[in-house]
Image (tube, helix red, strand yellow):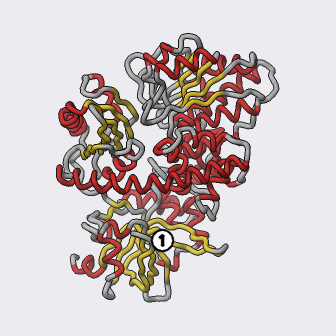
Amino acid sequence: MAFLDIESSLTGRRWIGPDVETERATDAMMQGTALPRSVCQVLTRRGVPAAEAEAFLSPRLRDLLPDPRSLRDMQTASARFLEAVRKRQRIAVFADYDVDGGSSAALLIVWLREMGLASTLYIPNRIDEGYGPNVPAMTQLAAAHDLIICVDCGTLSHEAIAAAKDADVIVLDHHLGGETLPPALAIVNPNRQDESGDIGYLCAAGVVFLMLVETARQMREANMPPGPDLMGLLDLVALATVADVAPLIGANRALVRQGLSVMARRERPGLVALSDVSRMDSAPSSYHLGFLLGPRVNAGGRIGKADLGARLLATDSAPEAEALAEQLDKLNTERRDIESAVRAAAMEQAEERGLDAPLVWAAGEGWHPGVVGIVASRLKDAANRPAIVIGLDGDEGKGSGRSVAGVDLGAAIQRLAAEGLLIKGGGHKMAAGLTVARDRLPEAMERLSDLLARQGAGTAGPADLRLDGVLMPKAVTIELIEQIEQAGPFGAGASAPRFALPDLQVKHARRIGESHLKLSLGDGMGGTLDAIAFGAFDTSLGQSMVEHGGARFHVAGRLEVNIWRGRKTPQLRLDDAAPSQSASSSR
């Protein structure tokens, strides 16, 4: 039975609450701990046993960080890296143009700088060079350097790495590997086919961090002086992990928790400048990393100069950081305008094809390759299906895709490339990129749809809204919200807790900005709660709440602390609502 009898809400979703077994586990945890019921509900939904509740709320990195040597080629990679440092050799860092690539590059650049060694940063232009190492760039870098480190790319770059014959090449990556590997000195990747996959959830920055941990161990074994403080680099790892939508499980959870603490100290000029230009007015959270900082770092690689984000994250100069942050903020605004136009056209095209197919896709002439990934994510969210969006230019199309839980898009894209239907393609389970010949586009999308259908794509209806429990407005306090946040960080693989608040009246509701909704809710017994719903007018939610006509609603969303002019108040991040009268009458 649907939670609160909500089979179809104002956004068309069914509400799913905790089952009987989860409620029993919650009761048992409450008896064995001093935690509030709502916190226990969050923990039991995540499968945390009562005996491990306290440890889960205070994760320690040393308990969760995997042994770097568990990864193939790790010792070789760290030894060669350390050799280059000791011999003061010339090192180049070749990185992807997204947040993970930029953060990974910054980790190495900052570490090397603290060791007194400068390095060369190279990030390919998305439009002119495409993703990953290419033959001209690698040939040029190899002629001028002793060691090239490819981060967040390289696992499938056979020809380009072979061209770098005048230098050693190390690959630190997390994208799916093929049956054969490029001729690099070392390829450290938890998603190589000969790896167990146990830590395949790491992003590239997580892999780079593990290499630095192994390097520190080798330095101790060689009785060398201690190197840079690795814990102080975790703000970069946290940013990459969240922005790359890596699952916040296992070591990632501890890396992000510790990284947020480091970021709160405001010691890295680039992140300080970026936080200020983003108008962050509270301690950093995973939300800030994913929705404020990440998009701005990405903006350079999407529509500006590819290396802006990495330079911002790596700089130790406050004036340079401020200038770069301002530039990225402007590019992000421009990116949003471009995205809006492509999104509208792609959605119209996808709707004409039908949003109930195993694959939702759209392709358009001249669509900017820097925004197709974001638009694919929007289509995926709208249809609850894997989505591909492609920009066509000449005889080719370059696209990006996003997937849903349980459907491995990267593997399907790789198979398509192996079958010759794509010029190239790769990625991981939840995201992938591709290049396709224009005349083979329909055939390729039909085949991809078939491969995804075999994985179960296309069988689901609108995504259910999963809720952790029920609260009344008076129970929502700053203290409770802060206790719930201790179960985080929340994001991919660890969805934010959401609660239902039943039978509330809309006291005030108004539209803010283009599509957002601000409202005040009350239970009629003195309990009130402010709420905000971003993008509410993109669905029927916003208009229905504004034109409520005195109706009462069951509402659902995430609890958060709102800070305005130094004053903290509880707030509901409204995700959904349903008229309570209709719910009652349906019983």
Position of the C terminus, as image quadrant, is bottom left
The quarter in which the N terminus is drawn is bottom left
Report x, y in % for residue 496. 47, 58
Q: Is residue 488 something one can see in this rendering?
A: no
Residue 565 on image: x %, y %: 65, 74
Identify which residue is drawn at 66% across, 29% down: 212
Q: Residue furthest front?
A: 394
Taking depth in this image into account, of 434 and 194 the one nearest to the observer is: 434
Quarter assignment of residue 240: top right
- The kind of residue on which mark 1 rests is Leu
Residue found 46% across the figure and 77% down from its top:
472
Q: Nearer the viewer, residue 432 or 210?
A: 432
Seen as rendered, the residue at the extreme top is: 165
Q: Quick one: SS at disc 1? A: strand
The spot of residue 337 in percent (x, y) is 41, 56
Quadrant of the image occupied by residue 439: top left
Left or right: where does residue 455 sit relative to residue 483?
A: left
x 34%, y 43%: residue = 403
Give the mark count. 1
Residue 8 is situated, as x and y percent measured from the top left of the image, at: 25, 67
Q: Is residue 493 visible?
A: yes
Q: In this figure, which residue is indicated by the disc labeled 1?
A: 572
Residue at image coords 39%, 81% = 504
Q: Is residue 158 above or below residue 529?
A: above
In depth, the one of 92 and 99 nearer the eye is: 92
Q: Residues within 10 Å of mark 1 (few under 14, many from 20)?
A: many
In screen coordinates, is 97 left or right of 178? right
Can you tell which quarter of the image residue 216 is in?
Answer: top right
